[in-house]
Image (cartoon, grey):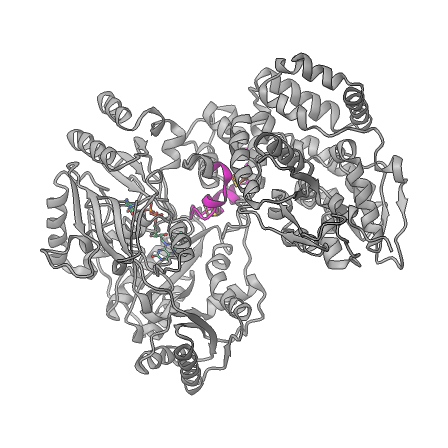
């Protein structure tokens, strides 16, 4: 049976506007044509649901991209804003009958926009600092970690908050600051070394993708991930030369930078000769699993990137499908009341890595836990990489609605599988929590704390 | 371009944030679910209530500017493409359930309400609203009414028209009318309610609807039958009805569809089957079981190759996968998917499918057919590429032949998607010259200046009907 033929056919238009020219060049015109405008993606899209207007929907954004490529419209500031309003959560993909690769289209559009920038100064400065200056360099991230840790521990943080220094920053950055976890310069390798043996007969040899933010802000979660994997029968290696996955770069249109990082990671993990590459952050995993597409134009890397992509798996899926799942005991020591737990999907884990059921399966296996499904748990929380910094208004509107659903579960624990979501949910609980203590945790930490060490 | 004075009036009526004429808004309302059709409006408005709709209509009729009502733009006939410019009116803000009357079992709703949201809401209260177009997760009640949409349950439960008891609508002049009511019987004059159902936004803007609700069936069973012989499948459909059984669902897939679905969903379907029937019955448990058993016997008698009855709900879901994947599987095959809805008397299904296959061969295009066998409503679906004008031309010729074939078999050019722009050139084939002039007369009374959704339903020119050669 014939499968979809990509003709690569594009209209022959000589755009005078350089951005329109770049968009026609970079956008995959096959994907633009594949969108049949059925609208099935509209109800899945958070920005459409918040605003109710077509340009804020996946179908609308694709139509706008195509209109610019076709020369029906100039790519003005509103167009630019519209492309940046997209959360990149990709909830529009699993519901699309035509299998339109929206995630690729938005990256290509942002790539073109990035080549013709008009960023406001603070955003520009921050982007430059993080994308080129910090994320790609582990040592700098670590020193950032040290600085932050110092700032947090020295009491400076309290001084800063108390003295109103934070008020100098825009409101949403102040909010963010309050929920930042304690950073550390002691990453997972510093704490556990580069190889960690399996408990019992090894089922497989797996490599941990430690992530850059994860390893600075949530090193404890990385440590727990390794130990949990070992407990379930996996030998874990942690390649020390691995770098940032490049997701934030790719989603923001810095595709070339993302590709550079991808090549390093592919090389480093290939040398380890492992059965699986495990991620515990949906946002990273989703890009890792698409490295083959990211590097598809690069013949020399085709085979290796396919090798890499086919081995990437989220820890929850690996545990459920191949692990010897250990018994998780009751966390709440004496009380016999079951503890209510709910789960916020990481968009990229669910929509791209397609692991929506596994985290829930694991939670349900913990003793004395009642899993309470949250209404619209599969909807983006508004974190979306650096979205809550660049699009604060929409992000906070989405968060507010999310928290209504969170609070309605009456859960004691709110679990998630991605650092961005974790921080956003902490922010949500801090701003809109309903008073009683609700703890926001990474799924792995919750499970590890309940390991029944026999 | 709209006159500045009109723009000022419209802004005044809906407020600045709910009037848009920027390039993004115009592009984003230049299309609907119909392939290869695009035209920009001059402005977009988002009214909040009937009074605003009425004020908008008054302003537009003064300036004789076209108005296109729009739900979610999921229609497949070009119904919301503003081919003559004008103002697109998006109904999404009017999306409330105004009243649920448990004594009369009726609901009063606004037109921008999403069909599935409505259905979920009333099902949670133990009620049932049967019209379930496959697009219901996105379509609006207003769009359903304007197209008289049908669904999988049409055979037993009817389509949208059977559940609309009353309407509130705004005429082209801005006048507000109310028709029908919470009444199961009403013969006070001509039935304006039914006239507005299926009027495709060309007679009035629907601003409120009173819908009939019914008690839900107690149980449901699902079965799947495969046939090597197309006529065996078709005879089964007729025999089921002859046995005085009306199944809740009676769906059909032809061989090209089976192949595509199997390739997509890896279901291990036998590829040499000419047809698959998916059958569901609902009602009280004993009747359901008895009907399903009778249907099973009929399938066997008509030489079904295999018959599977689902014992559990999970198994039923598995049987449903093939039919549910049909559209998705076809949509992924090529960039452009053209889905039509030619409809024939159910006794003619096999003939129609064979005709469609012959026509596809004749024009060398790919057309797979699935659809609602119970009511003869077929979905011949062409997979093609909008960027290839030569192939598109052949596809158009094929569809023209398909419409003609449907009429020859006593059928119609469209069963549930509406006429819009796409089928306007063929409408006269179905209703005749006197039918057209009668309909035009009705249009003139409702909308003398032709500002409501112009360019739809009535074509500037009717296609010359070809005499089909087949053998
Ligand atoms: C994948 C797919 C599957 C589909 N499956 C089915 C199916 O199973 N059965 C079926 O019948 N259809 C089906 N359709 C067609 C379509 O979804 C229906 O026609 C639906 O009812 C349109 O609803 P909408 O809200 O999108 O209306 P729109 O597309 O926005 O509008 C449709 C028409 O209604 C008019 N209109 C909208 N609102 C109003 C109003 N308030 N007052 C007056 N006129 C109004 C418009 O002017 C237009 O002419 C399908 C479409 C797609 C893309
Ligand atoms: S669901 Fe897919 S094909 Fe349909 S409008 Fe959205 S992106 Fe386009
Ligand atoms: S990625 Fe998310 S926000 Fe962006 S269009 Fe798709 S569903 Fe909407």
**Magenta segment: does it hold B60?**
no
Quick check: can you spot residue A13? yes
Residue A442, percent from left and from top: 71, 42
* Residue in view at x 58 percent, y 70 percent: B268
Q: Nearer the viewer, residue A286 or B366?
A: A286
Horizontal side, residue B396 vs residue B325: left or right? left
Residue A348: give x, y in percent of width and height.
Answer: 63, 43
The quarter holding residue A203 reads bottom right
Q: Is residue A56 left or right of residue B51?
A: right
In which quadrant is the N terminus of chain B drawn? top left
- Depth check, front residue: A399 or B11: A399
Given residues B154 and A258, the one toward you in this image is B154
Say which residue appears at 46% left-offset and 75% top-offset: B274
Q: How many marks?
A: 0
Q: Could you tell me residue B120's position as x and y percent?
A: 42, 54
Question: Which image quarter is the C terminus of chain B in?
Answer: bottom left
Residue A295 can be seen in this image: no
| Depth order, front residue of B90/B470 | B90
Is A30 within the magenta? yes
Q: Where are the magenta residues, as a range? A: A25-48
- Judged from this view, the residue extending furthest toward the bottom is B301
Q: From what the image shows, is residue B185 above or below residue A450?
A: below
Query: Is A375 displayed left or right of B95 in the figure?
Result: right
Q: Is residue B381 above or below residue A137?
A: below
On the image, the x and y values in percent for residue A244 come to 75, 34
């Amino acid at each position: 049976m014939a499968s979809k033929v990509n003709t690569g056919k594009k209209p022959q238009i000589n755009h005078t506007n350089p951005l329109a020219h770049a968009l026609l060049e970079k956008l995959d015109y096959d994907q633009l044509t594949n969108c049949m405008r059925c609208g099935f993606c509209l109800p899945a899209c958070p920005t459409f649901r918040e605003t109710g207007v077509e340009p804020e929907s996946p179908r609308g954004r694709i139509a706008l991209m195509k209109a610019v490529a076709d020369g029906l419209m100039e790519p003005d500031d509103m167009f630019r804003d519209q492309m940046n309003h997209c959360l990149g959560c990709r909830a529009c993909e699993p519901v699309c009958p035509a299998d339109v690769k929206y995630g690729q289209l938005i990256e290509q559009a942002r790539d073109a926009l990035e080549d013709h920038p008009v960023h406001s100064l603070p955003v520009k400065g921050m982007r430059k600092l993080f994308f080129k200056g910090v994320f790609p360099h582990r040592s700098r991230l670590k020193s950032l970690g040290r600085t932050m840790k110092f700032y947090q521990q020295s009491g400076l943080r309290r001084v800063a908050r108390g003295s109103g220094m934070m008020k100098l920053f825009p409101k949403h950055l102040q909010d963010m600051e309050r929920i930042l976890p304690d950073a550390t310069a002691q990453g997972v390798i510093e704490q556990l070394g580069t190889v960690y043996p399996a408990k019992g007969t090894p089922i497989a040899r797996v490599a941990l993708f430690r992530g850059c933010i994860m390893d600075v802000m949530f090193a404890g979660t990385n440590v727990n991930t390794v130990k949990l994997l070992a407990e379930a029968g996996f030998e874990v290696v942690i390649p020390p030369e691995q770098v940032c996955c490049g997701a934030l770069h790719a989603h923001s249109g810095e595709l070339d930078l993302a590709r550079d990082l991808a090549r390093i990671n592919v090389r480093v993990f290939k040398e380890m000769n492992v059965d699986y590459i495990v991620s515990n952050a949906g946002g990273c995993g989703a890009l890792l699993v698409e490295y083959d597409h990211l590097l598809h134009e690069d013949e020399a890397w085709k085979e290796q990137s396919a090798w890499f992509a086919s081995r990437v798996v989220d820890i929850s899926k690996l545990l459920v499908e191949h692990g010897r799942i250990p018994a998780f005991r009751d966390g709440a020591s004496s009380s016999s009341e079951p503890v209510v737990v709910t789960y916020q999907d990481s968009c990229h884990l669910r929509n791209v890595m397609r692991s929506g059921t596994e985290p829930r399966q694991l939670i349900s296996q913990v003793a004395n836990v009642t899993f309470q499904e949250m209404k619209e748990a599969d909807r983006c929380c508004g974190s979306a990489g650096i979205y809550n910094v660049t699009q604060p208004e929409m992000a906070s509107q989405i968060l507010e609605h999310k928290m209504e659903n969170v609070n309605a579960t009456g859960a004691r624990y709110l679990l998630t599988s991605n650092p961005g979501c974790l921080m956003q949910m902490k922010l949500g609980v801090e701003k809109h929590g309903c008073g009683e203590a609700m703890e926001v945790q990474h799924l792995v930490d919750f499970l590890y704390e309940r390991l029944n060490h026999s | 371009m709209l006159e500045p004075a009109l723009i000022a009036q419209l802004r005044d009526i809906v407020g600045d944030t709910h009037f848009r004429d920027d390039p993004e808004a115009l592009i984003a309302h230049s299309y609907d679910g119909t392939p290869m059709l695009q035209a920009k409006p001059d402005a977009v408005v988002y009214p909040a209530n009937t009074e605003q709709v009425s004020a908008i209509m008054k302003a537009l009729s003064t300036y004789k500017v076209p108005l296109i009502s729009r739900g979610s733009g999921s229609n497949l006939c070009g119904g919301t493409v503003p081919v003559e410019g004008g103002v697109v009116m998006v109904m999404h803000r009017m999306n409330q359930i105004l009243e649920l009357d448990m004594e009369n079992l009726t609901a009063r709703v606004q037109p921008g309400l999403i069909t599935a949201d409505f259905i979920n809401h009333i099902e949670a209260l133990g009620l049932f609203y049967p019209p379930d177009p496959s697009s219901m997760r996105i379509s609006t009640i207003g769009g359903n009414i304007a197209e008289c949409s049908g669904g999988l349950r049409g055979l037993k439960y009817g389509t949208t028209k059977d559940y609309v008891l009353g309407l509130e609508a705004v005429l082209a002049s801005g006048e507000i009318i109310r028709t029908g009511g919470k009444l199961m019987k009403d013969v006070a004059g001509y039935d304006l309610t039914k006239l507005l159902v299926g009027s495709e936004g060309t007679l009035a803007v629907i601003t409120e609807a009173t819908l009939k609700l019914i008690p839900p069936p107690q149980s449901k069973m699902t079965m799947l039958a495969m046939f090597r012989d197309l006529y065996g499948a078709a005879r089964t459909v007729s025999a089921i009805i002859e046995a005085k059984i009306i199944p809740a669902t009676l769906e059909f897939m032809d061989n090209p569809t089976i192949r595509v679905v199997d390739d997509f969903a890896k279901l291990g379907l036998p590829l040499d089957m000419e047809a698959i029937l998916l059958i569901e019955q609902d009602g009280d448990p004993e009747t359901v079981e008895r009907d399903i058993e009778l249907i099973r016997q009929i399938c066997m008698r008509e030489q079904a190759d295999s018959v599977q009855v689902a014992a559990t709900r999970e198994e039923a879901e598995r049987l449903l996968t093939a039919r549910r994947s049909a559209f998705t599987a076809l949509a992924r095959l090529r960039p452009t998917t053209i889905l039509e809805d030619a409809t024939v008397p159910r006794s003619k299904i096999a003939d129609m499918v064979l005709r469609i296959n012959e026509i596809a061969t004749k024009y060398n295009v790919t057309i797979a057919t699935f659809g609602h066998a119970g009511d003869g409503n077929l979905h011949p679906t062409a997979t093609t590429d909008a960027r290839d004008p030569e192939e598109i031309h052949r596809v158009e010729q094929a569809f023209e032949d398909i419409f003609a074939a449907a009429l020859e078999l006593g059928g119609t050019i469209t069963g549930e998607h509406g006429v819009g722009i796409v089928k306007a050139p063929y409408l006269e084939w179905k209703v005749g010259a006197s039918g057209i002039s009668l309909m035009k007369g009705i249009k003139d009374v409702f909308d003398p200046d032709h500002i409501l959704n112009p360019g739809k339903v009535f074509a500037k020119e009717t296609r010359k009907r070809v005499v089909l050669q087949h053998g």
